[in-house]
Amino acid sequence: MKKAKVRVSAHPQTFFGAALFRAALLSTALFAIGTASALANVGANEGIDFGIRFFDRRIYYAANDPIYIQVTIANNSPFTYRFKLADDRMFSVDFEVRTVTNRLLEPANELVRRRSLSRQVFFREIAIEPGESFSFVENLRDFVRIDEPGTFVVRGFVHPELYRPEFVTTNVRADQRQTAMWAPQEMPLVGVLASGRLSLSIRAPLIAGLDGLPTAMYVATGAILVREALPPDAVVEYTIRARQMSQWERFFLYLDLEEMISRDPVRRRVWVRESEEGRQRMVEQFRQELRSPMTNEAISLVPTDFIIERTQHTGNEGTVTVLKRFRGAHFTEVKRYTYYLQRRDNIWSIVDFSVVNLGAE
C-alpha cells in the first residue's frame, strides 16, 4: 500500500483535563472504561482496517525495557479517510492490556498525569486515500503499567477526533467486538477504531550475576545463564556449539551486539545518528536478523564441524581463528573465521568477526 498524505493543522485544540482527573480519583475502573473504548458509528469506519503488531518482537521482561507496538490504519474504502493525529500521541491512541483472567492493568502514571492537565493539543490532519495506509510506532509502557510477569492480551484504540474525557461511554456489541458510543454535547459521533487482540508474554526480571551484569535464562531447562570469566577460545567454542544446537540464549550470551553494530560500516552510519531508543531498536532488529532462518549473517551459519586453530590475546583484546566446514548436498565448503574479542570486567565478549572462503572439498 502507498503512504498516506499528511497535512499540518494551523490551529491547536484546547484540552481540558479536569474531568479525567476527577474520574481517576473516583475510580480507576472509570478510566479503564475510557481506554477500553472501541468502535462508534460503525458505518463511518466501513472499509477502514486498524491493526497492531509488535514492531520488534522479542523476549520481554517485567522491567522498563520498551515494548514497541506498530499501529497501522489502512483505507480499503472508496473514499478518503481523515482523522486527527496529536503530536502527543497519548491524545490519539489508547491501549488496553488484560490478564488471562480478564483483569485490566492500570494506566501508566505519565498517561494519567498528561491527560489530567488543561493544555493545548497540537495535531496534524492525516488524509488516507483509498488503497493507502498510515503507520506509526508507540511504546506500550507509555500507556499501561506492566510490572509483573505473565501472559496478557493487548488491544489498541485510535481516537480520530482526539481523546475527550468528557465524553460518555456506553458499552454495546457490534460484529462480536466490544464497542462504545461516544456522545459529546455539540459534536457528531465519530468512530473510535479498535484493533484485534495481540498476545503478549512477559517474563520475570533477569537476575544479576556475580559480576553485577544481567544474566539470561536458558529456556529449555529454566537455568540462569551467567557470563563466566572464560578464556577467548572457550568463549568462541561456547558460542559456536550453542548455534549448532539452536540454543539462542546461549548463542547471544557472549555477543556484544552494540559493538558489532558500531563496527559494521553500513550500520554504523545509522547508529551514530540514532537516539538511545533508536539504538535499542537497532540492537533488537540485529538480534532478530541473526535468528532469522533467511539470514545472510555468516556468524549465524551452522557448521558441520569446526577446529580452533589459533588464539592470541593481550590484556583486553584477543583474536581466535576457527576453521569451519559446511556440508552441502555434493560438496563441503571450508571457511576460516577470525573472531575479535574484548575483555571488560574480566569477561571476554565477541565484538566482531571476519570470514575467508577457502574453497570446497
Image (spheres, rainbow, N blue to C red):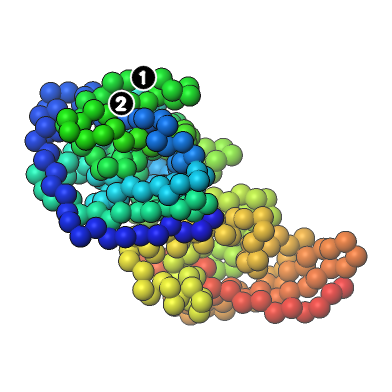
Residue at position x 41%, y 30% in the image: 42
The residue at 37%/26% (across/down) is 179
As drawn, is 44 to the left or to the right of 285? Answer: left
Name the image quarter holding residue 213.
bottom left
Whichever of callouts 1 and 2 sits on the residue coming sooner in the sequence is 1
Q: Position of residue 60 (x, y in %)?
A: 43, 44
In this view, the residue in front, 342 or 50, is 50
Q: Residue furthest front?
A: 79
Q: Is residue 136 above or below residue 144?
A: below
Separation of marks 1 and 2 at Cα, in angstroms:
8 Å
204 or 95: nearer the eye? 95
Residue closer to the observer: 205 or 102? 102
Residue at 49% x, 50% y is: 130
* Marker disc for residue 172: 1
Q: Are marks 1 and 2 in contact (CB under 8 Å)?
A: yes
Q: State the quadrant of the C terminus.
A: bottom right
SS label for mark 1: strand
For label 2, the SS is strand
- One can see residue 63 in this view: no
Pointer 2 residue = 181
In the picture, measured across the screen, residue 99 lies left or right of residue 330, that is: left
- Residue 356 appearing in the image: yes
- Crowding near pointer 2: few (<14 within 10 Å), some, many (20+)? many
Could you tell me the amino acid type at mark 2? Answer: Met
Q: Position of residue 15 (x, y in %)?
A: 14, 44
Q: Position of residue 205 (x, y in %)?
A: 37, 42
Between 148 and 130, the one lying in front of the other is 130
Tell me where residue 54 appears, x and y as whole percent: 47, 46
221 displayed left or right of 144 = right
Vertical placement of residue 55 versus 303, above or below:
above
Amino acid type of disc 1?
Val
Q: For residue 239, what is the image quadrant?
A: bottom right
